[in-house]
Amino acid sequence: MKTVTRFAPSPSGYLHIGHAYSASLAYQKAVETEGHFLLRIEDIDRVRCRHEFETALLEDLKWLGLDWEEPVRRQSDHMEDYAAVLERLHERGLIYPCFCTRKEIAAEIAQSDSAPHGPDGPIYPQTCKSLSEAEQQAHFAEEKPYALRLDMQKALDEPGARHLTFREIDKGVIECQPEKFGDVVLARKETPTSYHLAVTLDDALQGVTLVVRGQDLFEATHLHRLLQHLLELPTPDYLHHGLVSDMKGRRLSKRDKDATIRAMRENGYSPEEVRKLAGFNNK
């Protein structure tokens, strides 16, 4: 079978050497089966994402020797897709509006003797889950900011939702535990989709069969698998690779200017040297 992979950067800064590894690995997995390598621009964060960074990342990927199929999918061009699946979840009673501010949530958690934590931090204490329809409408009328949260309990009560698995190609079948996320945010008033919702839908719409991404996103796969089940989407295989670190063992980020592909290009490195420094073994 031909493998369909993707590289999905966010244009909120310059790509770094860790991105070079991830993109090259995804590209290689597609080439090995004469498959397809796709590029997706994850630009739902309208504050941090900038056109200049998108232009730069396209240049950097071309410089690394990568080619991808057109057209490139930009999340900001497809907000209606995410709105449609949110409406489906709403019609089934699987999401609810939350009007709590981050400060209010933090204060309530601070008062708890045993606030549970999930992969993204403290689990939301479900403050708004019990609001009546009238109370919800009153908050909407006041134009309060809000988030749309997944009702995890109802989601897990859906047929088959408690016995989900996904396949990690170097580890085998993994049993899912999406409940560790609690009532996770799927959208906000000012941002009509979350990373979790958008990436799950996009992978399905683009026909991705193998998701190659960093180990830091391994836990998120438990939640993504639940969303796939709720939305009747196909489940790809996964490969979560180790993260590239600096000499002190720190995980690299876009703030590490010396580790950006752009800086290395300017300092005379070749694409082959960058891939080698990233730990990528070109086959």
Image: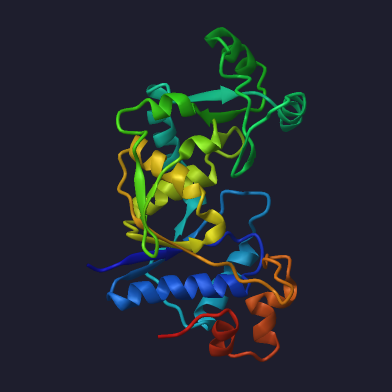
Measuring 60% from the left and 61% from the top, which residue is drawn there? Answer: 11
1 versus 234 height, above or below: below
| Towards the viewer: 80 or 1 | 1
* Residue 173 placement (x, y as % from top left): 35, 53
Q: Residue 184: tell me if it is visible.
A: no
Q: Residue furthest left?
A: 1
96 versus 136 height, above or below: below
Q: Quadrant of the N terminus?
A: bottom left
Measuring 59% from the left and 44% from the top, which residue is drawn there? Answer: 119
- Tell me if 224 is positioned left or right of 254 in this view: left
* Residue 104 placement (x, y as % from top left): 74, 26
* Residue 83 placement (x, y as % from top left): 45, 36
- Tell me if 82 is positioned left or right of 260 in this view: left
Measuring 50% from the left and 48% from the top, which residue is drawn there? Answer: 220
Indicate the quadrant where residue 254 lies.
Answer: bottom right
Q: Residue 141: tell me if it is visible.
A: yes
224 versus 50 height, above or below: above
| Towards the viewer: 134 or 141 | 134
| Towards the viewer: 146 or 212 | 212
* Residue 205 placement (x, y as % from top left): 34, 51
Q: Quadrant of the C terminus?
A: bottom left
How is the structure coloured here?
A: rainbow
